[in-house]
């Protein structure tokens, strides 16, 4: 969310974009979002919006332990 590569994608990490994506999910569906890194501000936004979420980190490339990219899963 803090390092959006394409300006048009910024909406995906804002209240409106999250609400639209969540509304499009089938019952029991999960939205997966990739981020270049963890974002305390984005995590706070998810909490403020009352969205159930969990996150994790994964290496940015095979065989390289760092940097880590973040994955967010929103239900």
Image (tube, grey):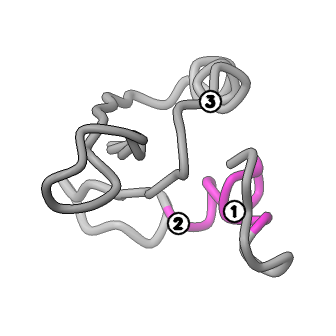
Q: In this image, 54 relative to 9: left or right? A: left
Q: Which residues are magenta?
A: 10-21
| Cβ–Cβ under 8 Å for marks 2 and 1 | yes
Q: Position of residue 58 (x, y in %)?
A: 25, 43
In the visual, does 27 lie left or right of 18? Answer: left
> In the depicted view, which residue is nearer to us: 71 or 61?
61
Cβ atoms under marks 3 and 2 closer than 8 Å: no
Q: Earlier along the polypeptide chain: callout 3 or callout 2?
A: 2
Q: How dense is the environment of label 2, judged by Cα within 10 Å: few (below 14), some, or many (20 and up)?
A: some
Membership of 65 in magenta stretch: no
Return the x and y of residue 55 as percentages of the image width and height.
33, 31
| On screen, residue 20 above or below 54 | below
Which secondary structure lies at badge 1?
helix
Note whether 72 is above or below 56 in the view shown. below
**Residue found 37% across the figure and 30% down from its top:** 53
Q: Badge 1: few (under 14), some or many (20 or more) residues near its Cα, within 10 Å?
A: some
Q: CA distance from mark 3 to mark 1?
A: 17 Å
Q: Identify the residue position indicated by label 2 in the image.
A: 21
Question: Label 3 belongs to which residue?
Answer: 39
Residue at 69% from the left image edge and 28% from the top image edge: 45
* Residue under the image location 58 percent in, 24 percent down: 43
């Amino acid at each position: 969310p803090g390092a959006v590569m394409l300006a048009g994608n910024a909406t995906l990490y804002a209240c409106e974009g999250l609400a639209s994506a969540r509304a499009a999910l089938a019952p029991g569906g999960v939205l997966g979002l990739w981020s270049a890194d963890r974002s305390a501000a984005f995590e706070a936004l998810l909490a403020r919006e009352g969205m159930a979420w969990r996150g994790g980190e994964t290496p940015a490339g095979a065989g390289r332990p760092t940097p880590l990219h973040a994955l967010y899963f929103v239900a």
